[in-house]
């Protein structure tokens, strides 16, 4: 070295063979060995720190280096061969980027070659060849597991999602804490001894159904659209003549577009064959012709001009329901409907459909039934004289039977209930027709749960509706228990509780089990469950007989007697068990009924004390 003079320049040491000064070399770099830069204590601590990070494997590793340095750790490999081999490979990968950065520095400068920070930061953005990029990725993944990349993070996230999905799958079962989760082979059958063991100790829940089984009412295929019989009709206008001479498809389109209702607003009167044709056209399921809206507008127009709407007769109503697919032969065989309401049905039964299509058919059927009931309610209210008491009893029986259809069990039927309310309120001699109506309604089905559904379908917003519910419940209980129906129809008002006291003594499941075995043609699978099922329905009917109205003074003693019988029959004497959930349901209903009756007793004067409370087993 030459000592510096006054006018000369100071001579400095030549740069290191790598081309970088010691403060330009990052810590994880392998360009130069850190043995000559740091003390042995510092290098040992750094090596222990890196080993600790490898063992703990944190979710996020160290940040990326500013330089595109190769992530080879010299301190992680105590031997010299590994260090020199990694350094030589890293020199080949970074040489191009650093050479470009050095070329940007002005040549001829005797000072140390200092690469600007901007060039150092942009050195890693130089394009690399695919071979060099693959070699760098290989070194990054194999020699430094702490360096994170976007691909590795995305892959780790996917693996976590797959592991979580496999753990939540029901096909995977966990053997124990130490063993991995395995999926059993579904195709492998169980051995014979295993199946016998499971069949021996299997426990069936045995619950009481919450929904009634229903009746196969709308089981036939709906008939095609009827044809309009226009013979003998004289057209009142040119447009009406065009409609009467058109084909059936054009007539249906004329109705669907709403032109028919506009036509008969301009002419004096709508012919009766056209009105009957529209009413039969309403039986199409689904209603693609908009016949209900047309007939409704024509009837409203007649009501405002003539003063009375057109009302279909009872046979026409029965034919419409038969065209909709109803099979009324069961009511005719029991003598509940006349023959003109039950035409001979030679149609084949409807084929079973898929669940999705069955739900759509149930919605369409409920919509069609609601439209027919809405039109009939208008006729019953506007022209009450068109339907005498006997016709109203027939319509009440028919509508209650239609409401038991299996497809309509879970569908709300407000229009049907409103029509039942209108028919009940229009009966002239109520007390004379009430026994006959109860005897007819208690025979619309042979299943006790369906009869409970009939009682629930009746409206209870008026005094007649509530009285019909009480009397019908007594008739159904007497029929199910084998008692004569004449003994449970008291002649005086509010005498139902006295008749109920004689019937409630027979609702014990042990007593009903003998009745079930005697009535069933084949022995049931579980007679105890069937007896509790029947007792459950009888208790619901008894609750409907008591009602929610305030008791009279002479009725309090009967209700106290009913509470005592309920405690004796379905209280402590009814045992429960793990496989006897139907008994638990029956006892829960008995408890709720007992509490309700006690509340009715507590509504009396303060000097009248209620009877003793429900006794625990």
Image (spheres, helix red, strand yellow):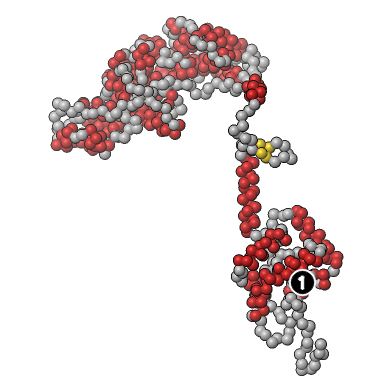
Which residue matches tag 1? 32
Q: Is residue 603 left or right of residue 234?
A: right
Residue 559 seen in the figure = no
Q: How many marks?
A: 1
The quarter holding residue 221 reads top left
- Residue at image point 81% right, 59% down: 48
Give left or right: position of 337 versus 166: left
* Residue 492 horizontal side relative to residue 307, left or right: right
Q: Nearer the viewer, residue 103 or 557?
A: 103
Q: Quadrant of the C terminus?
A: top right
Asked which quadrant contains residue 371, the reply is top left
Q: Position of residue 21 (x, y in %)?
A: 75, 76
Residue 449 location (% of width, % of height)? 48, 18
Q: As displayed, is residue 176 above or below residue 315?
A: below
Task: State whether residue 224 appears in this view.
Answer: yes
Residue 34's place in the image compared with 360, above or below, is below
Q: Quadrant of the N terminus?
A: bottom right
Q: Residue at x 64, y 41 (%)?
A: 167
In the picture, measured across the screen, residue 74 lies left or right of residue 396, that is right
Q: Position of residue 470 (x, y in %)?
A: 46, 15
């Amino acid at each position: 070295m030459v000592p510096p003079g006054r006018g000369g320049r100071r001579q400095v040491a030549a740069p290191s063979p790598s081309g970088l000064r010691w403060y330009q070399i990052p810590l994880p770099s392998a360009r130069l060995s850190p043995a000559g830069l740091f003390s042995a204590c510092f290098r040992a601590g750094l090596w222990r720190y890196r080993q600790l990070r490898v063992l703990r494997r944190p979710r996020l590793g160290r940040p990326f280096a500013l330089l595109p340095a190769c992530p080879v750790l010299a301190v992680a490999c105590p031997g010299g061969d590994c260090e020199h081999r990694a350094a030589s490979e890293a020199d080949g990968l970074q040489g191009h980027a650093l050479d470009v950065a050095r070329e940007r520095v002005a040549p001829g400068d005797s000072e140390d070659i200092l690469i600007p920070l901007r060039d150092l930061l942009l050195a890693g953005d130089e394009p690399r060849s695919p071979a060099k990029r693959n070699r760098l990725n290989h070194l990054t993944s194999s020699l430094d597991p702490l360096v994170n990349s976007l691909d590795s993070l995305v892959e780790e996230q996917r693996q976590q999602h797959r592991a979580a999905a496999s753990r939540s799958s029901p096909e995977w079962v966990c053997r124990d804490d130490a063993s991995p989760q395995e999926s059993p082979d579904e195709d492998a059958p169980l051995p014979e001894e295993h199946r016998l063991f499971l069949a021996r100790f299997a426990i069936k829940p045995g619950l009481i159904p919450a929904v009634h089984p229903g009746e196969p009412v709308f089981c036939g295929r709906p008939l095609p659209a009827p044809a309009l019989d226009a013979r003998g009709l004289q057209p009142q206008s040119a447009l009406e003549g065009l409609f009467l001479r058109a084909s059936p498809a054009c007539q249906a389109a004329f109705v669907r577009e709403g032109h028919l209702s506009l036509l008969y607003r301009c002419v004096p009167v709508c012919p009766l064959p056209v009105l009957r044709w529209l009413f039969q056209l309403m039986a199409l399921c689904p209603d693609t012709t908009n016949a209900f809206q047309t007939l409704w507008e024509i009837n409203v127009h007649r009501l405002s001009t003539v003063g009375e709407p057109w009302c279909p007769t009872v046979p026409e109503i029965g034919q419409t329901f038969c065209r909709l697919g109803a099979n009324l032969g069961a009511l005719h065989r029991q003598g509940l409907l006349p023959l003109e309401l039950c035409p001979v049905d030679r149609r084949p039964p409807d084929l079973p459909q898929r669940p999705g299509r069955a739900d759509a058919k149930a919605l369409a059927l409920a919509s069609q039934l609601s439209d027919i009931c809405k039109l009939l309610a208008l006729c019953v209210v506007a022209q009450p004289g068109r339907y005498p008491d006997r016709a109203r009893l027939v319509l009440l029986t028919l509508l209650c039977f239609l409401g038991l259809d299996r497809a309509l069990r879970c569908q709300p039927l407000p229009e049907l209930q409103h029509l039942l309310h209108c028919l009940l309120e229009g009966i002239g001699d109520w007390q004379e027709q009430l026994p006959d109506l109860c005897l007819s309604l208690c025979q619309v089905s042979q299943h006790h749960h369906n009869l409970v559904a009939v009682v629930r379908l009746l409206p209870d917003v008026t005094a007649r509706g509530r009285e019909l519910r009480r009397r019908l419940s007594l008739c159904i209980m007497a029929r199910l228990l084998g008692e004569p129906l004449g003994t449970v129809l008291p002649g005086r008002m509010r005498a139902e509780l006295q008749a109920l006291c004689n019937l409630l003594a027979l609702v014990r499941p042990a007593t009903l089990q003998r009745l079930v075995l005697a009535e069933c043609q084949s022995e049931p699978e579980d007679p105890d469950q069937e007896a509790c099922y029947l007792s459950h329905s009888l208790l619901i009917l008894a609750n409907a007989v008591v009602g929610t109205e305030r008791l009279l003074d002479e009725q309090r003693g009967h209700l106290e007697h009913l509470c005592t019988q309920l405690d004796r029959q379905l209280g402590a004497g009814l045992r429960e068990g793990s496989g006897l959930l139907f008994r638990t349901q029956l006892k829960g209903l008995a408890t709720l009924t007992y509490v309700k009756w006690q509340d009715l007793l507590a509504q009396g004067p303060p000097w009248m004390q209620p009877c003793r409370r429900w006794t625990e087993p």
